[in-house]
Image: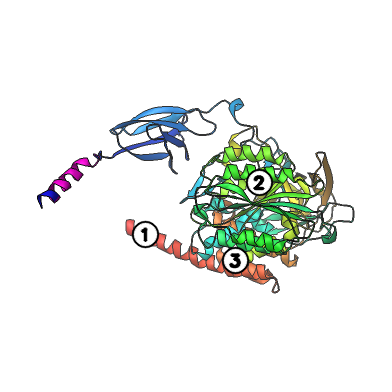
């Protein structure tokens, strides 16, 4: 017994002394007093990294009463501060001169010539991140008649919204990108003339949420490639198999998705597989499309585990694509991930610089996002936009089938790169205009030297660009189409795949007004999609929109034979119930607080 007691005392004395934890607290602001979110905080004593929260505040557990913290945020001077547990630290970061900014930091989605830009916060939802967007406002057409936007085929926002609704969760406002919601349905596709890349149609009608205003639709349809003449593909599947992918709606879903894609391969196509997780490596060297069984076996062997060295994986995938580059072919990396990079380049700016250098090789990038809880939408969006590519979010096997089977050519074969649409309004008809969707990120708006960069358009794609119009007196009184003066002029700038020379084509829209009730059902249904996105964003421009109005319009205009449109009606009815319940709970809580 004595022996046991002595051993017990010895073990107790041998244990390391655990020091009392201390709590270092503070707030980070800029030199104008505005709180700064997502500031990187490096604890020099331990090497651990933290970030400020929504209100610019931080709280760090430390083993000592004082510690030295390093604060850094892109666009601001780095600063080291000694923080004491007894004092609430107030840290001020100063803006760097504009010449010090990285020229690869951000790119605008839309731009109105000579219009001063605004700023807004960055939004965080749990561990999911979304790039903050500033909703476009009404612009005076006499002062600023020209505006423009980047076109692409991204549609990730819609399926991500559906995921939130299906899990009875509120949708983060910055996860709502209305142009991507419209892209999801490929509305009103009209083939261009034989030798043309684009066909453009315009429609002017009344605005359901403000009868004094009008809606102006621009429908851009791209050439559809002949399936029999598609060029050979050199595809590199870059698959995240890190520990964070070990969930049914992540790696298993992606394996099913790639199974679907492999079924579309032809003998002249080539597939390689690069994986990154605990290690980075080539899982499958370049393999011909006729060897489907070999490719599927390599996919089935994938197992999750380890960290997320996204940077190394990206470098290896692009190197493989370059080494087997097919001149005149479809060379593309398909990145599948939840975006949670934690080894190598981690910040959005670092990833943007990396992918910008890689795109110069002529290799395209398609991003497939999966997961929930730590899904990094903002990072994947950066990669797809800077990588001359497109972005889809897979929330189910049905969505994977839609993106990689039903819309195979639209997703993987580009007909135009760097597509940018410039619109010039006639002030005689337009007093003010507001571009719906195509909202810019806060960080892009802060940098006055940023510019719009065009997007990739896939085969057979149809895009809607929609403006809310405050008509001038001429526009209010000319509804009988008594005049044929131009209402708007459009110019599409683009490059053909593999070409560095820019081309352009112009279109003119004469004044022609159609009552909303007389429109084709696809335009009325598209309007219900806009209303839904506006409600989710709590847009100040659509305060008169009600859930019942939006559901009624969607139900009446949805194509009975279109599964996607019928699914939308069901989803928005679920959303109404969800948001109505949350609103009632808030009212009860407010009454209780009083």
Q: Is residue 22 left or right of residue 112?
A: left
For the rendered model, the colour scheme is rainbow
Q: CA distance from mark 2 to mark 1?
A: 52 Å
Task: Please name the predominant secondary structure of the magenta segment in the image.
Answer: helix
Q: Per the image, is 380 magenta?
A: no
Q: Please tell me which of labels 3 and 2 falls first in the chain.
A: 2
Residue at 76%, 48% in the rendered image:
429
Q: Per the image, is 12 magenta?
A: yes
Q: Residues within 10 Å of mark 2 (few under 14, many from 20)?
A: many
Which is nearer the eye, 181 or 323?
A: 323
Q: Quadrant of residue 10?
A: top left
Which label sits on residue 589?
Answer: 1
Which label sits on residue 549?
Answer: 3
Q: Quadrant of residue 443?
A: top right
CB atoms of marks 3 and 2 within 8 Å: no
Which is nearer the eye, 434 or 9?
A: 9
Q: Is residue 490 above or below residue 160?
A: above
Q: Tell me residue 319's x, y (percent).
A: 68, 42
Element type at mark 1: helix
Front tag of 2 and 1: 2
Report the residue marked by disc 2: 317
Q: Which residues are magenta?
A: 4-16
Q: CA distance from mark 1 to mark 3?
A: 27 Å
């Amino acid at each position: 017994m004595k022996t046991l007691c002595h051993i017990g005392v010895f073990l107790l004395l041998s244990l390391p002394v655990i020091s009392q934890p201390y709590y270092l607290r503070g707030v980070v602001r800029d030199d104008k007093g505005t709180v700064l979110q997502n500031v990187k905080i490096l604890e020099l004593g331990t090497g651990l990294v933290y970030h400020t929260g929504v209100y610019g505040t931080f709280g760090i557990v430390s083993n000592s009463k004082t510690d030295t913290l390093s604060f850094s945020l892109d666009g601001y001077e780095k600063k080291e501060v000694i923080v004491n547990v007894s004092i609430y630290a107030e840290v001020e970061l100063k803006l760097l001169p504009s010449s010090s900014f990285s020229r690869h930091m951000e790119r605008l989605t839309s731009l109105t010539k000579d219009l001063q830009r605004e700023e807004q916060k960055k939004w965080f939802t749990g561990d999911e991140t979304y790039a903050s967007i500033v909703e476009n406002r009404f612009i005076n057409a006499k002062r600023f008649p020209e505006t423009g936007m980047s076109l692409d085929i991204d549609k990730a926002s819609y399926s991500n919204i559906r995921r939130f609704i299906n899990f009875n969760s509120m949708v983060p406002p910055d996860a709502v990108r209305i142009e991507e919601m419209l892209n999801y349905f490929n509305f009103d596709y009209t083939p261009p003339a034989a030798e043309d890349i684009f066909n453009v149609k315009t429609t002017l009608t009344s605005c359901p949420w403000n009868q004094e205003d009008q809606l102006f639709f621009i429908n851009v349809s791209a050439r559809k490639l002949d399936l029999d003449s598609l060029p050979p593909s050199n595809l590199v599947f870059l698959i995240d198999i890190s520990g964070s992918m070990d969930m049914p709606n992540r790696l298993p879903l992606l394996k099913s998705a790639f199974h679907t894609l492999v079924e579309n391969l032809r003998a002249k196509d080539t597939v390689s597989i690069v994986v990154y997780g605990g290690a980075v490596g080539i899982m499958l060297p370049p393999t011909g499309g006729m060897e489907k069984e070999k490719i599927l076996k390599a996919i089935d062997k994938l197992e999750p585990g380890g960290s997320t060295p996204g940077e190394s994986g990206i470098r290896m995938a692009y190197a493989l694509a370059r080494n087997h580059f097919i001149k005149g072919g479809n060379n593309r990396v398909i990145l599948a991930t939840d975006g949670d990079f934690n080894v190598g380049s981690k910040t959005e700016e670092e990833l943007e610089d990396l992918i910008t250098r890689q795109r110069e090789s002529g290799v395209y990038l398609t991003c497939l996002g999966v997961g929930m809880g730590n899904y990094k939408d903002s990072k994947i969006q950066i990669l797809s936009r800077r990588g001359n590519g497109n972005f889809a979010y897979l929330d189910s096997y049905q969505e994977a089938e839609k993106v990689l089977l039903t819309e195979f050519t639209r997703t993987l074969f580009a007909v135009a790169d760097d597509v940018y649409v410039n619109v010039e309004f006639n002030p005689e008809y337009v007093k003010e205009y507001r571009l719906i969707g195509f909202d810019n990120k806060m960080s892009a708006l802060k940098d006055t030297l940023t510019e719009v960069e065009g997007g990739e358009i896939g085969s057979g794609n149809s895009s809607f660009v929609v403006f809310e119009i405050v008509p001038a007196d001429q526009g209010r009184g000319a509804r009988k189409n008594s005049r044929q003066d131009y209402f708007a002029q459009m110019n599409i700038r683009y490059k053909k795949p593999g070409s560095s020379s820019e081309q352009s084509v112009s279109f003119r829209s004469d004044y022609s007004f159609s009552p909303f009730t007389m429109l084709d059902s696809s335009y009325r249904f598209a309007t219900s999609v806009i209303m839904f996105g506006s409600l989710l964003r709590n847009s100040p421009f659509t305060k008169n929109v009600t859930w019942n109005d939006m559901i009624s319009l969607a139900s009446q205009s949805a194509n009975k034979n279109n599964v996607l449109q019928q699914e939308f009606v069901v989803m928005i009815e679920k959303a109404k119930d969800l948001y109505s319940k949350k609103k009632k709970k808030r009212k009860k809580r407010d009454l209780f607080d009083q």
